[in-house]
Image: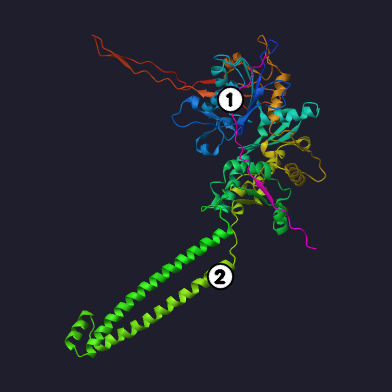
């Protein structure tokens, strides 16, 4: 018995249309303290809600994009889920991020307006709630300064706390597993714009040895779009970036051994079993409408009949013209036979002929052409009936065109090639190290004892770490990197995308801002902002590192005043010159901060 043929896996794009976010009811608190608002300000999605125990996930979750036409009013801007379909407005979309750093604070203000409005905050002119906000690892001072200025000056918030999303997720997972702090480990975080290697020693981020890799989910989606557009040039408009993101999230996987997995795809049986056929939307109706086989054969017969009638009519007209010309030439030849030489020569001149032999040659050719024309007419009349019988008896042997199969995308090796760029950025032309090579570089900067402590808790988080097989791939790479018989442990976040918000929520509940002027570690008050500047950071377990830096500020030297001449009555003028300080520069210590 022959083995059963593999079943084709055909999938359809969901093309989900987002619906506008609802405006939630205002939070009513029984105690006098204001409930904090937790905002996970991600480069792909923004997640926001109140810091309450009864929430398992944030109720506000939308794409971090805004669409506003040039010259449009501020109220006409569409934010996140207000845009039902991103593709028609792709050229209008703007984000507040450059890579993973907030640089466009006009868009960031629109995002905050959207969040506060949909959380039901109705207070005029200010937000009377503390804000817990995520930021990038080693966030630049200027970006934090602008963010603090926006929150304190524009919204008038009482307290702000900044933390790193990956660290929030790390501590949330450790708390769920009842691990005692402080924890030591190394975090592999991969989002939409970039990935990070973040070592954590005794519960605090080692910012000096943290590294960033400029490859993540956004680059994988663009790479997949480029591969499929090259493979299917007839469907360029249908291969959109939104559909490529759906392919990555639901149909891609990470190969444990990339080369070995590619060899498997060489097998036709493996290909037919594992290839995913993505069905594009199409119209089943042909341009001429949906017709049956009998109607199609009848139309062909009518077209053939009209063609035969046209050919027969054209042959008849040509035969009639040849017959008329032959009759005229025969009449001229009869003039020669009857002895009318003058009329004969006059007719030859009219016919542009020189002799009777030339006339006879033309007559012979026309007689042959007329005879052949009559034969063709007789043959076409007899063949017309036979052709009709053949069309009715012989079915259509041309294979039917499968419109559905033409609109299918066969996604094969692309399922593993796109996630592979996280480990081999050179596949897309990027000249930088992959994530595991960067991890090896970071580990080499520590002592063997610290390396053992770090690799004993390798933590994976971020939306780009959800591919099936990612944990196994990292374990295999660590097995090749680490010394023989060394131990390590890889843990995937319980909720890689929501872990940051949940961790920030837990931290806000455990460390509420101080009341009555009391200071709590991790919170920046309005007074701190005014006294220490917008770049100030109050450290906590999930924050960046605050490092004050002294910069020698050179003051400009005072210029010497010009000489003044005072005229006197007695003698010559008296010159008075004012001297300048001998030192050309002064040095002052200006406190700065760095993360």
Residue receiving disc 2: 390
Q: Residue furthest left?
A: 342
Residue 541 position within the rendered picture, expressed as x and y whole percent measured from the top left: 71, 25
**Local SS, label 1:** helix
Q: Which residue is the site of mark 1?
A: 144
- Answer with left or right where residue 340 lies relative to residue 174: left
Q: Residue at x 53, y 26 (%)?
A: 105
Quadrant housing the N terminus: bottom right
**In the image shown, does 568 or 481 lie closer to the viewer?**
481
* Mark 2 burial class by Cα count in 10 Å: few <14, some 14-19, many 20+: few
Q: Residue at x 57, y 60 (%)?
A: 294
User: Which is more toward the observer, 204 or 295?
Assistant: 295
Residue 430 in sight from this viewpoint: no
The range drawn in magenta is 1-28
Asked if residue 18 is positioned above or below residue 440 in the image, the reply reads above
Q: Residue at x 28, y 84 (%)?
A: 330
Give the left or right position of residue 383, taking residue 505 as reference: left
Residue 386 coordinates in the image, percent (x, y): 53, 72
Residue 50, visible in the rendered structure: yes
Of the image marks 2 and 1, the number of the one nearer the N terminus: 1
Q: Which mark is residue 215?
A: none
Q: Is residue 112 left or right of residue 200?
A: left
């Amino acid at each position: 018995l022959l083995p059963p043929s593999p079943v084709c896996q055909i999938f359809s794009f969901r093309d989900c249309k987002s619906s506008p976010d609802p405006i939630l009811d205002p939070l009513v608190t029984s105690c006098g303290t204001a409930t904090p608002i937790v905002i996970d300000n991600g480069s792909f999605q923004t997640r926001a809600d109140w810091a309450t125990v009864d929430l398992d996930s944030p109720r506000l979750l939308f794409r971090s994009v805004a669409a506003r036409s040039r010259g449009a009013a501020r109220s006409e801007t569409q934010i996140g889920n207000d845009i039902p379909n991103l593709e028609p407005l792709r050229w209008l979309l703007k984000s507040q991020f450059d890579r993973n750093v907030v640089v466009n604070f006009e868009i960031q203000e629109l995002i905050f307006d959207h969040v506060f409005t949909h959380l039901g905050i109705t207070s005029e002119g200010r937000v009377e709630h503390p804000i817990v906000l995520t930021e990038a690892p080693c966030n630049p001072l200027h970006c934090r300064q602008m963010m603090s200025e926006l929150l304190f000056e524009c919204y008038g918030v009482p307290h702000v706390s900044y933390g790193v999303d990956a660290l929030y997720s790390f501590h949330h997972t450790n708390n769920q597993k009842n691990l005692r702090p402080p924890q030591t480990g190394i975090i592999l975080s991969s989002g939409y714009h970039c990935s990070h290697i973040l070592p954590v020693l005794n519960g605090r981020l080692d910012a000096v040895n943290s590294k960033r890799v400029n490859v993540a989910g956004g680059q994988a989606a663009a790479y997949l779009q480029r591969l499929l557009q090259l493979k299917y040039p007839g469907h360029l408009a249908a291969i959109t970036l939104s559909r490529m993101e759906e392919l990555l999230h639901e149909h891609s996987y990470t190969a444990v051994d990339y080369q070995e997995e590619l060899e498997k795809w060489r097998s036709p049986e493996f290909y037919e079993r594992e290839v995913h056929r993505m069905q594009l939307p199409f119209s089943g109706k042909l341009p001429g409408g949906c017709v049956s086989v009998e109607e199609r054969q009848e139309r062909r017969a009518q077209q053939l009949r009209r063609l035969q009638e046209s050919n027969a009519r054209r042959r008849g007209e040509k035969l009639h013209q040849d017959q008329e010309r032959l009759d005229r030439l025969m009449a001229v030849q009869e003039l020669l036979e009857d002895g009318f030489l003058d009329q004969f020569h006059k007719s030859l001149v009219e016919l542009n002929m020189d002799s009777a032999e030339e006339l006879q040659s033309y007559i012979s050719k026309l007689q042959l052409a007329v005879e052949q024309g009559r034969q063709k007419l007789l043959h076409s009349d007899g063949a017309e009936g036979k052709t009709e019988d053949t069309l009715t008896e012989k079915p259509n042997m041309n294979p039917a065109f499968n419109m559905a199969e033409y609109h299918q995308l066969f996604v094969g090796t692309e399922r593993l090639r796109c996630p592979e760029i996280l480990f081999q950025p050179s596949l897309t032309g990027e000249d930088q190290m992959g994530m595991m090579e960067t991890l090896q570089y970071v580990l080499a900067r520590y002592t063997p004892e610290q390396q053992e402590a770090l690799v004993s808790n390798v933590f994976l988080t971020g939306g780009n770490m959800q591919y099936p097989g990612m944990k196994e791939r990292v374990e295999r790479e660590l097995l090749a990197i680490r010394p023989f018989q060394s131990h390590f442990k890889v843990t995937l976040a319980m909720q890689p995308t929501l872990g940051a918000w949940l961790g920030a929520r837990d931290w806000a509940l455990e460390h509420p801002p101080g009341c009555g002027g009391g200071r709590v570690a991790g919170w920046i008050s309005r007074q701190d902002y005014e006294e220490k500047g917008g770049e100030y950071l109050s450290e906590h377990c999930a924050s960046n590192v605050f490092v004050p830096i002294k910069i020698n500020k050179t003051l400009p030297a005072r210029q010497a005043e010009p000489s003044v001449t005072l005229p006197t009555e007695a003698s010559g003028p008296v010159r008075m010159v004012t001297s300048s300080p001998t030192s050309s520069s002064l040095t002052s210590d200006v406190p700065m901060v760095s993360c």
